[in-house]
Image: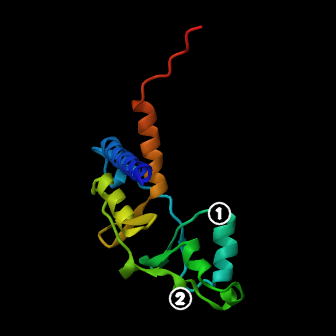
Amino acid sequence: MGCLYRWFLLQAAGAAYLQVQAGALLRGLRVKDVMSTDYTTVDPNMSLQQFVHEQLLRTGRRCFLVVQDSRLLGLITPNEVRGVEPQTWPDTAVRAVMRPADKLHFVSREMPAMEARQIMRQEDVNQLPVMSDGGVDGIVTRAHVLQVLRSRAELNSPPILPRAA
């Protein structure tokens, strides 16, 4: 029992250390620094069949904003599609399975990046639309944040010195 307890403490300490390190690496950054303005929108009336074959499988993207008349209606990812039987895809509209906008968490461009990361962790979501004045400015994803963390960690790490012969 003692080994399991020590292992748990080590895991918790490691996670806490990584959290502190991530906070330090993201310090001073805002959502606008880590978001992407390159996002794809889809029509809410598009069938899931068309969405899967023309968007998901062709682009390799994981997140799509559902927009109609320049208004964000929701968001759709492979996760939402997975819950629908493939034989019903031709007759099911994106609108029927998307996460509606009123169920999404939004962030602003000026929000600290660390705060957006915490929202993603707490709400267990991989992406957050970035909104201002009722319009979409972009999207921030866990992948974007991890990329920034990785780049900053590499630049802040000490150089690797050649080994002595």
| Pointer 1 residue | 59
Along the horizontal axis of the image, is 97 left or right of 156? right
Residue 44, how many percent across, how many down? 53, 83
Question: Which residue is at 40% across, 50% downward?
Answer: 2
Q: How many marks?
A: 2
Residue 12, how many percent across, how many down? 37, 51
Question: Which residue is at 31% across, 45% downward?
Answer: 20
Which quadrant would the N terminus be assigned to in this image?
A: bottom left
Which quadrant would the C terminus be assigned to in this image?
A: top right
Q: Nearer the viewer, residue 34 or 133?
A: 34
Residue 110, how many percent across, how many down? 27, 56
Q: Mark 2 and mark 1: span between their CA atoms? A: 22 Å
Residue 94, how many percent across, how many down? 56, 83
- SS category of the residue bearing label 2: helix
Mark toward the start of the polypeptide (2 vs 1): 1
Q: Is residue 84 above or below residue 78?
A: below
Which kind of residue does numbered mark 1 sit on?
Thr
Q: Is residue 164 above or below residue 27?
A: above
| Pointer 2 residue | 96
- SS category of the residue bearing label 1: helix
Quadrant of the image occupied by residue 127: bottom left
Colour theme: rainbow
Q: Are marks 2 and 1 in contact (CB under 8 Å)?
A: no
Which kind of residue does numbered mark 2 sit on?
Ala
Q: Is residue 100 above or below residue 143?
A: below
Question: Which residue is at 63% across, 82% downward?
Answer: 48
Along the horizontal axis of the image, is 111 left or right of 125? left
Neighbourhood count class around disc 1 (C-alpha, 10 Å): few under 14, some 14–19, many 20 upward: few
Neighbourhood count class around disc 2 (C-alpha, 10 Å): few under 14, some 14–19, many 20 upward: few
